[in-house]
Image: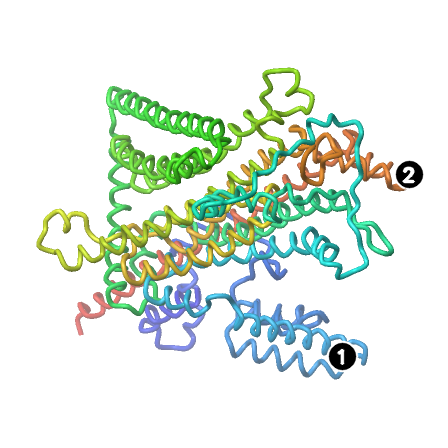
């Protein structure tokens, strides 16, 4: 508005030479300002907005003379106003300095207690900032990720940051498992402390349920050790790697009894809860960024043209790729606009035809998925039925093929189905952006559903009993005397095989392809094949798939997080070398803000799917009576009510009350009310944001109007006869 006043005075001042005409000038300026588009818009829709200064999430009134006086009069009277609060105000540097000087001048009028409290608060904030800066120097792979960001931009950097997050997550999970499960056993086993193992015999269990046939020892071939190492059988089966090793009811120290079964179950709940909270926390941060960056179509074009460059890029070839990426984004927007216009102009016959075609193609997608799931089911059943043969009756390759048959089928399905989906999507006539999202959604479902099919196939084989002898134990104890070990071995094989595939693809596919593209450029087929692209979504789906396997398998193989940590470290360096020497960034853009939220969303879906088989195995499938810490319990979860029964009566009554329906219904109602409040608050903030966007749009129209009026006045003055 100040700009409009200045322009108005510049326009009308030449017409008034006497100071007595000032009132006329003011009235003329006022009438001129009323012609502005912003004023007319405000006059049409008169709304009042309450401007609050609460830090973190609310809006401040734009800096003006009134707002400055308000800040000086109201804010500085509050004792909690610190340097951090001043930093958040929408003021320029000179005004912030002036406010800081006023604040420091008022300190001497405070009491000694208030001065000490203010000094302590500033010292604590300074300590936290310095500690945060110190830990930033200890950040894992900091220089490597910065180098990747500098050469290839923030999109690919977000993938490696996500991989680093999974490394830290698995390391923390392993530390929790080591402290609460492995450490007490190590202290007792190696006589480090005065403690003993406590094993409670149970006479209620049939003896045939406790039989666990051991592998015969003697002359063992070298390839037998290789098979055991790759499959988790043989000498690895009774190590601390698997569930069966922890056949202990407790560890009796000098002054207390450590309940190992309870610690085993609570550790599982703890690492799942930790993963959930950590992922949700990071997802909320990414969602905030996406919410802030949500933009209209016109703003999208402006941002791509004027603010689309990634200034972290320093490599020339990557800069050219960024140019093509921005060009691709603009073409994609134009293509979406064309498709939107095409959809609006469709006739009913064309609409019916395209929807019929989509229905047919989706039926084809479902057929592909069902075929893959059935192949995984058949491979798992065949592998489980033939893996009990003696190793010396089969050759090395045959035995290894049978052991890894489910993993091979799952890997082939994960490799073939994305290619099929990418071909099918072109015939469904969607916009380019929706094509990417739908293809990714199908690939996510395929990768995670294959794990579920494998898990539920194993569960059906474990619980299937065809005679009364099998039903005594509640599970098929003849084929699976320690079914948790077999389950953990399958997860272990999937983890190892996935690592082998990643290494093999990099060494035997990507490097030879790079050599052919570099030195055989005269071949048309090689030129058509081109250099390998570093596809961010495909790589992310791969590590989410591996992390989901880790979450599911950790209950049955407690050391699997340590293996996953080492695996992800290897994958980090392999992918970094592959990116630097054999791959090029994808031509399709993938922004860091969008990708971080997408990565965590897919990871959250994987964690949610991991809850299902773990919950079923802990609460419904009877625990093995021949191995593991839960040999004296029907299911793993039975230890929770048994432990609660040992609590004092008031505590038992409190726990039963908060887990009853009488507590659940009011709690659910309160949660719904809280959600309704936050939804209403989000709606109010959204309306404020819309008003601010409308205000920015009106300001741009005001500028166009003022420039047009100024041009007209200048033209009139030039045409005025002298």
Q: Which mark is residue 115?
A: 1
Tag 2–tag 1 contact (CB < 8 Å): no
Q: Give the mark nearer the N terminus: 2 vs 1.
A: 1
> Which quadrant holds residue 201?
top right
In-front residue for pair 291/128:
128
Image-based side of 628 in relation to 331, left or right: right
Q: Element at badge 2? A: helix
Question: Is residue 291 shown above or below 32?
Answer: above
In-front residue for pair 116/661:
661
Q: Residue furthest front?
A: 219
| Whole-percent x, y for residue 685 in the image | 55, 49
Q: Residues within 10 Å of mark 1 (few under 14, many from 20)?
A: some
> Which quadrant holds residue 311?
bottom left
Image-based side of 549 in relation to 151, left or right: right
| Whole-percent x, y for residue 79 in the image | 72, 71
Location of mark 2 (residue): 649
Q: Residue furthest top?
A: 467
Question: Is residue 75 shown above or below 232?
Answer: below
> How far is mark 2 from mark 1, CA to CA?
50 Å
In-front residue for pair 525/586:
525
| Whole-percent x, y for residue 35 in the image | 38, 55
In-front residue for pair 58/280:
280
Q: Residue furthest right?
A: 649
Question: Is residue 660 shown above or below 602?
Answer: above
Q: Is residue 233 visible to us here? A: yes
Q: Is residue 548 visible to us here? A: no
Image-based side of 656 in relation to 627, left or right: right
């Amino acid at each position: 508005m100040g700009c409009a006043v200045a322009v108005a005075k510049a326009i009308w001042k030449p017409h008034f030479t006497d100071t007595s005409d000032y009132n006329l000038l003011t009235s003329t300026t006022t009438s001129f300002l009323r012609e502005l588009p912003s004023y007319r818009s405000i006059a049409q829709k008169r709304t009042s907005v309450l401007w609050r200064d609460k830090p973190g999430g609310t809006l401040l009134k734009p800096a003006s003379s009134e707002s400055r006086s308000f800040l000086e009069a109201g804010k500085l009277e509050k004792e909690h106003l610190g340097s951090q609060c001043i930093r958040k105000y929408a003021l320029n540097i000179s005004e912030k300095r002036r406010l800081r000087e006023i604040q420091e001048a008022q300190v001497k009028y405070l009491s000694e207690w208030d001065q000490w409290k203010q000094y302590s608060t500033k010292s604590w904030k300074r300590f936290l900032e310095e500690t945060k800066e110190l830990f930033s120097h200890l950040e894992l792979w900091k220089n490597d990720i910065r180098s990747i960001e500098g050469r290839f931009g923030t999109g690919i950097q977000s993938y490696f940051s996500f991989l680093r997050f999974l490394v830290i997550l698995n390391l923390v999970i392993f530390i929790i498992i080591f402290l609460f499960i492995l450490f007490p056993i190590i202290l007792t086993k190696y006589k480090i402390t005065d403690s003993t193992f406590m094993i409670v015999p149970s006479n209620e269990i049939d003896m045939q349920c406790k039989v666990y046939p051991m592998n015969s020892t003697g002359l063992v071939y070298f390839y037998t050790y290789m098979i055991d190492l790759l499959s988790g059988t043989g000498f690895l089966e009774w190590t601390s790697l698997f569930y069966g090793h922890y056949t202990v009811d407790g560890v009796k120290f000098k002054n207390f009894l450590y309940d190992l079964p309870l610690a085993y179950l609570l550790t599982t709940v703890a690492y799942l809860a930790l993963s959930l909270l950590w992922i949700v926390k990071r997802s909320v941060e990414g969602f905030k960024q996406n919410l802030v960056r949500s933009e209209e179509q016109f703003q999208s074009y402006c941002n791509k043209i004027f603010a689309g460059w990634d200034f972290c890029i320093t490599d020339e070839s990557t800069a050219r790729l960024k140019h093509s990426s921005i060009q691709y984004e603009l073409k994609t927007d134009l293509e979406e606009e064309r498709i939107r216009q095409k959809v609006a102009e469709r006739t009913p016959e064309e609409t019916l035809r395209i929807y019929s075609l989509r229905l047919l193609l989706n039926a084809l997608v479902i057929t592909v998925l069902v075929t893959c799931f059935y192949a995984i089911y058949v491979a798992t059943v065949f592998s489980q039925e033939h893996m009990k043969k003696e190793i010396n009756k089969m050759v090395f390759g045959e035995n290894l093929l049978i052991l890894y048959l489910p993993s091979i089928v799952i890997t082939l399905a994960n490799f073939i189905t994305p290619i099929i989906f990418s071909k099918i999507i072109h015939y469904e006539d969607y916009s380019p952006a929706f094509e990417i999202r739908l293809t990714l959604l199908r690939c996510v479902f395929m990768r995670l559903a294959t794990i579920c099919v494998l898990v539920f196939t194993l569960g059906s084989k474990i619980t299937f009993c065809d005679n009364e002898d099998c039903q005594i134990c509640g599970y098929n104890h003849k084929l699976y005397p320690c079914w948790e070990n077999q389950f953990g071995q399958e997860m272990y094989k999937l983890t190892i095989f996935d690592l082998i595939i990643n290494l093999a693809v990099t060494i035997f596919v990507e490097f030879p392809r790079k050599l052919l593209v570099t030195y055989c450029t005269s071949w048309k087929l090689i030129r058509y094949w081109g250099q390998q692209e570093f596809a961010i979504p495909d790589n992310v789906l791969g590590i989410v798939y591996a992390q989901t396997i880790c979450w599911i398998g950790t209950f049955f193989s407690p050391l699997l997080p340590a293996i996953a940590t080492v695996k992800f470290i290897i994958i980090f360096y392999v992918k970094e070398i592959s990116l630097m020497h054999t791959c090029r960034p994808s031509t399709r853009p993938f922004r860091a803000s969008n990708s971080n939220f997408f990565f965590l969303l897919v990871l959250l879906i994987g964690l949610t799917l991991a809850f299902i088989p773990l919950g079923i195995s802990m609460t419904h499938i009877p625990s093995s009576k021949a191995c593991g810490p839960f040999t004296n319990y029907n299911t793993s979860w039975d230890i929770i009510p048994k432990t609660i029964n040992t609590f004092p009566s008031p505590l038992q009554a409190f726990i039963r009350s908060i887990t009853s329906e009488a507590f659940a219904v009011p709690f659910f109602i309160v949660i719904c009310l809280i959600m309704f409040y936050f939804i209403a608050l989000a709606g109010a903030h959204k309306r404020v944001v819309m008003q601010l966007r409308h205000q920015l749009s009106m300001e741009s129209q005001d500028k166009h109007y003022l420039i047009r009026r100024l041009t007209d006045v200048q033209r009139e003055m030039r045409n005025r006869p002298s």
